[in-house]
Amino acid sequence: MTRTLADTLRGYLQYLVVERGLAANTVESYRRDLRRYVSVLAGHGTIRLDDVTAADVAEFLASLREGDEEHAALAVSSAARAVIAVRGLHAFAVAQGLAELDPARDVPPPTPPRRLPKAITLTEVERVLAAAGPNPNAPDSPDASPGPAPRTPTPGRAPTPGAAAGVDPRQLRDRALLEFLYGTGARISEATSLDIDELQLDSEDPMVRLVGKGGKHRVVPVGSYAVRAVEAYLVRARPALAGASLRGTPAVFLNARGGRLTRQGAWGVLHAAASRAGLDPGTSVSPHTLRHSFATHMLDGGADIRVVQELLGHASVTTTQVYTLITVDRLREVYASSHPRALGLPDPAQTPLAIIADRHRLHETVPIHNHARPLSAGPSWSASALRVGPSGASRVAVAYGSPRVAPWFTITMGWCSVAACRT
């Protein structure tokens, strides 16, 4: 007996959940696209699986791009996702013996234009984090800096019970959330689904277990800034937020009602912090902004692409390689600072050789020549001595010590950028 498209769709969706273990959001996207596919074919009188032709699939693709009275025209990426779902449905039917031919095999999905990830600079990241909430360092810490002004209480809303005096617990939560996103490269959905028992912050090497797409688990190190921010939130703010609900929850990040913070709520936190940070008008911020910035800053600092792939949870290194597509200006900068015939040093003191920082343990001492000159350290870290010599940035010798993006970081000194890493 020939199966109908509707019956095959139900079996395919169950296969995606049970055997493929795809995330709920992914399965919902497949369900939405395939229901539209079945509905379009039914409108043309095609109900049985064996009656579908390659022309039907191609016509469906065209209808996605053109739109109709009920649906707006889809972008190339969205149309490609729908065609991939259709191809998966028919490939499943053939593999299960429900159909002899695969009509979608010769209908490739449209290729969306390659778009570079939109990362923001380290300075902009610092501004967004500072705008999210107060600095988690103790008031007498040398690194402590005043946070943004406390939020104005919503009219008619009583202060959250148990909140620290003068500090809205949501501010501590927001700072912890954004520090965590940038310090681990986690997706927003991974952060909002995080439970308390998946955090291991009290060990010598703080770690977190993230559950990514398809239920895949990975263990990611947590930088010291994120550790301090999350610990401050868990101790000083989370109990106050949890008190707003009579039902307990293992979620790390809570909303004002004591429940688990949603993806939309977390995106709202990032968007609000970016707005308060006063970024340049042309700077766009998306839910993946801190994740993109995490990967870009890691690679700029010298991280191996395979390491970044594992930290981001990408199934293929091809996905991670998009972060290596850099601008012509960046290529020119690297060429000018690396090629022996491109250096052209009229002033030897203008070329970086080494960095000596008192808070890092040096594995190797790079000699500083007599024309070295002192520079001032940036706000993200402290140094008692910072000197630059003439032989090129490739010989930087500084031990691991990045407070946010471990173990690589970049120091920008106006006229050059120096990448420091574990040596």
Image: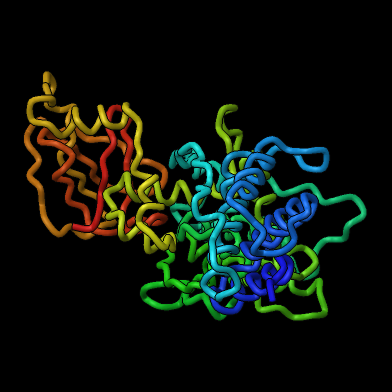
Q: Is residue 185 above or below residue 78?
A: below
- How many numbered marks, from 0 up? 0
Which color mode does the image show?
rainbow
- Give how far across and how far down residue 270 sits, in percent: 63, 48
Is residue 276 shown to the viewer in this render? no
Judge by depth and name the residue closer to the eye, 401 or 88.
88
Q: Which residue is pictured at 78% across the width and 38% down the height?
A: 68
Residue 225 lies left or right of residue 412; in this view the side is: right
- Which image quadrant: the C terminus? bottom left
- Give how far across and how far down residue 350 sits, in percent: 18, 27
Q: Is residue 249 above or below residue 186?
A: below
Judge by depth and name the residue closer to the eye, 328 or 4.
4
Residue 374 lies left or right of residue 339; in this view the side is: right
Most distant residue in the right direction: 156
- Give how far across and how far down residue 263 sits, in percent: 67, 58
Most distant residue in the top direction: 346
Is residue 85 shown to the viewer in this render? yes
Q: Indicate the quadrant where residue 156 lies.
A: bottom right
- Give how far across and how far down residue 48 sits, in percent: 71, 64
Q: Which residue is pictured at 28% across the width and 27% down the height?
A: 415
Residue 39 lies left or right of residue 173; in this view the side is: right
Q: Which residue is pictured at 45% across the width and 46% down the height?
A: 293
Q: Indicate the quadrant where residue 229 lies.
A: bottom right
- Which image quadrant: the N terminus? bottom right
Residue 93 lies left or right of residue 116; in this view the side is: right
Q: Which residue is pictured at 25% across the width and 57% down the height?
A: 360
